Image: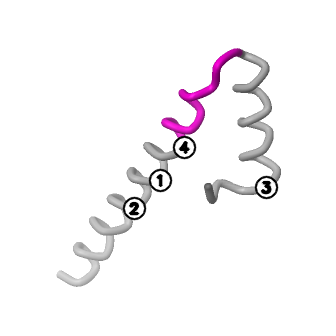
Amino acid sequence: MFAFLLEKVSIWFETAERNRREEYLAQSSDIVQLEKRIRSLETEGYSL
């Protein structure tokens, strides 16, 4: 039971983080800014 709850919480956090990254990338005004943001996430990590 504990493993099941832990897995569900983990999935919830992963989904929330993915949505946050997607929202951050979607705010880009053009392709150049989008590419810079993607590179920034890849090099500096995914913590916004």
Residue at numbered disc 2: 13
Q: Nearer the viewer, residue 38 or 2?
A: 38
Residue 12 appears left or right of 4: right
Residue 12 appears left or right of 26: left
Residue 37: numbered disc: none
Residue at numbered disc 1: 17
Q: Does dot 2 land on a helix, a strand or a loop?
A: helix
Q: Position of residue 13 (x, y in %)?
A: 39, 61
Q: Name which of mark 3 and mark 1 comes first in the sequence.
A: 1
Q: Name which of mark 2 and mark 4 comes first in the sequence.
A: 2
Q: Residue at x 23, y 84 (%)?
A: 2
Residue 23 drawn in magenta: yes
Residue at numbered disc 4: 21
Q: What amino acid is at disc 2? A: Phe
Q: Name which of mark 2 and mark 3 comes first in the sequence.
A: 2
Quarter of the image for the C terminus: give it: bottom right
Q: Position of residue 3 (x, y in %)?
A: 28, 79
Question: Which region shows up in magenta?
Answer: 21-30
Q: Residues within 10 Å of mark 4 (few under 14, many from 20)?
A: some
Q: How far apart are the alpha carbons under marks 3 and 1?
A: 15 Å
Q: What amino acid is at disc 3? A: Glu
Q: What amino acid is at disc 4? A: Arg
Q: How far apart are the alpha carbons under marks 4 and 1?
A: 6 Å
Residue 37 vertical placement versus 11 (above, below): above
Q: Position of residue 10 (x, y in %)?
A: 38, 66
Asked if labels 4 and 2 touch by Cβ distance under 8 angstroms, the answer is: no
Residue at numbered disc 3: 44
Q: Nearer the viewer, mark 2 or mark 3?
A: 3
Q: Residues within 10 Å of mark 1 (few under 14, many from 20)?
A: some
Q: Nearer the viewer, residue 38 or 48?
A: 48
Asked if labels 1 and 2 touch by Cβ distance under 8 angstroms, the answer is: yes
Q: How far apart are the alpha carbons under marks 2 and 4?
A: 12 Å
